[in-house]
Image (tube, helix red, strand yellow):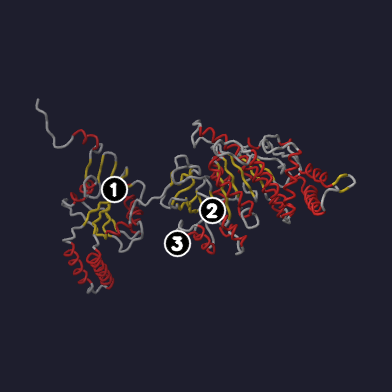
Amino acid sequence: MEKIKYKYNPYFINLVQPCGGISFKENYIKKGDGYEACIHIYDFPTTCGDFWLNSLSNISNDVVTTIDVRTADMSKLPDTLNKAINENLQRKNEKNNYEAIKAAAKVQDLAELTTDIVQHNEVVKYIIIRYYVYAKTLNELDDKVKSILTELETKTFKGAVFLNEQEYDWAALFLPIKLQKKFRNKVIEQPIQEYSLAGGYPFHFVELCDPTGRYLGYTKTGGNVIFDLFTKNSIRKSFNALLVGLTGAGKSTALKKLLDDNVIIGNTVRVLDLTGEFRNLVLERGGKIIKLDGTEGMINPFQIFATMIDVDTNEVLEELSYMFQISRLTMMYQFLSNNYDEAVTSEFERLVNEFYRECGLTKENCTSFKSNEYPIMEDFLRFLERNLYSDVENKLLRSNLSHSRIEKIENIIATITSTIDGYGSLFNGHSSLENLTNEQIISYEVRNLSQFKSNIFNAQIFNVLTMIWNEALKQGIIEKRKYDNGEITLWEAKKFLAFVDEAHKYINSNSEYAVDYFINFTREDRKYFGSLIYATHALNDLVPKGNDDRVRNITEKISTLFELTQYKFIMQQDNNVKEAVEKTFKNQLTESEIEDIPLYEEGECMLVINGMGNIRFKIEISEEEKRLFTGGI
């Protein structure tokens, strides 16, 4: 039996041929499963914006768009241009004013193109754009074709279904443009300059897709922003973030979305909430609210926390933690006394060391006691009185004390007594906030505390920040050990996030201690799977005004904090902040990006990632999130 020899693969044809056959009609194609038509763009506007091909190639979700391009034969192009110029010069003399003006403009365009070709070696391309439209019924097809033609007109392009050319157009789906040129229907090509075609790049598409991320919003080009703070690669090495946005710009919503995403996947979250903004969300997620005005618990300032860790062994450095505690108490005393005196401060530091030794707390073993085993402020006051008086009850001064030392101890006693009498519920007692490390989410409400005197506010915040860092270290040591031993991956490690809303309340020229704390946190937290996310209304809120040495020093520290922050979410800002934005994000934002920031709509945001390109996107939340995030978008 003789084998039949084909010049094509019949098996392949059987797989790809239209089911039910195909029939070419005057202005549509009839197939066994529906109807199809091809629309040509046959006329282009004189000028187009950047990425003009992007809108043309995304004109509809259920349309196939093809763009065929070829380079013009530059040896024949001068003759073609000459004919076109002569033709339009003749049309300039027509009586119809509109046609005459149109021809004159065309002559000018052709003259400019000729100049570009002669002087700048400009290359001309020919382009064919087709839309293949499909529908189940003929009426549906007509409606779709009409809709696309109308949309093209709004974009100042002209399109049409070419009669009796549907078979050629269908074949063009599978053939290169050089073979399409051989069709009998003389396909219409649109000449276009090379740089104009390049400027129309249709695949201009911005997205961020972290493998372990959660959906945050969408870019202007329709790309998803799937973001994970804890993505780590050769560029993204740390996990801290700054958010700035005017009231109503969506800053609070962005914070809550980041917070909620991390709570859902089991990470530990701590919040410093100045206004009570996070209360509903925290309670909804089973978290705990703690007011820092002393009504809902206490943090003993004399309790020694594990604040220093050996980076090689992940063990607590007892001696350094003790030294940090002395430094912390000294700083706190300066807040409480509200009057810095170096001699008195040195005496206070000496007395604290002596007090701890008397209590049996040594540098070698000071962080492992239970909270009720540490001394309290009242104990320290009694210790001071014993050091000052030989007979405390009758107030008899010790004879071996000099007058200056008596004066210093009396100053310290006066400060401690005043603190116990006025703010004992804040500072005089054992830490009652026990087992907080077992709480996944805690919000520390600062609203009432913010009404206290600034020295009391600063002392209590300093207390809380120390405890938060202690929690971060305790959790981080455990997770780091598991990670180093290969028991868990980076994704599986439990993270610790500290959210600080209204950060200008803490990061300012009057709170250098807080700036130092945040710098230390951002330097070290990545080693222990930690993240600091701080937010404020405007960059100007964080930048102190003035030109003295102290202001310059703290300005440098705040600049360091910004540099250590991997992610910056910039939402709408006032025009008067543009200079601060330009200075803060030097070489990270273009001039046009800075100019656009005051024009951002609600929820719009520029995400600046150190070492990467910027991503402009809109934060999107679900109806359920809208219910949870009261007060946001």
Figure quadrant of residue 201: bottom left
Dot 2 amino acid type: Phe
Q: Secondary structure at mark 2?
A: helix
Mark 1: amino acid: Tyr
- Residue to which mark 3 is pinned: 591
Q: Nearer the viewer, residue 437 or 249?
A: 437
Left or right relative to 470: residue 222: left
Which of the 4 image quadrants contains residue 73? bottom left
Residue nearest the viewer, comparing 555 with 312: 312
> Which element type, helix, strand or loop, lies under badge 3?
helix
Residue 272 visible in this rendered orientation of the protein: yes
Q: Residues within 10 Å of mark 2 (few under 14, many from 20)?
A: some
Tell me which amino acid carries mark 3: Glu
Mark 2 touches mark 3? (CB < 8 Å): no
- Sort mark 3 into few (<14), some (14-19) or many (20+) by Cα contacts within 10 Å: few
**Labels 1, 3: front one:** 3
Query: Residue 569: horizontal and vertical position, in percent?
Result: 51, 52
Q: Which residue is mark 1?
A: 132
Where 79 sits versus 535, above or below? below
Q: Nearer the viewer, residue 312 or 240?
A: 312
Q: Is residue 139 visible?
A: no
Label 2, label 3: how far apart the Cα atoms are:
20 Å
Q: Which residue in the protein does label 2 denote? A: 562
Determine crowd level at label 1: few under 14, some 14-19, many 20+ residues with C-alpha closer than 10 A: some
Which residue is located at x 48 percent, y 52 percent? 608
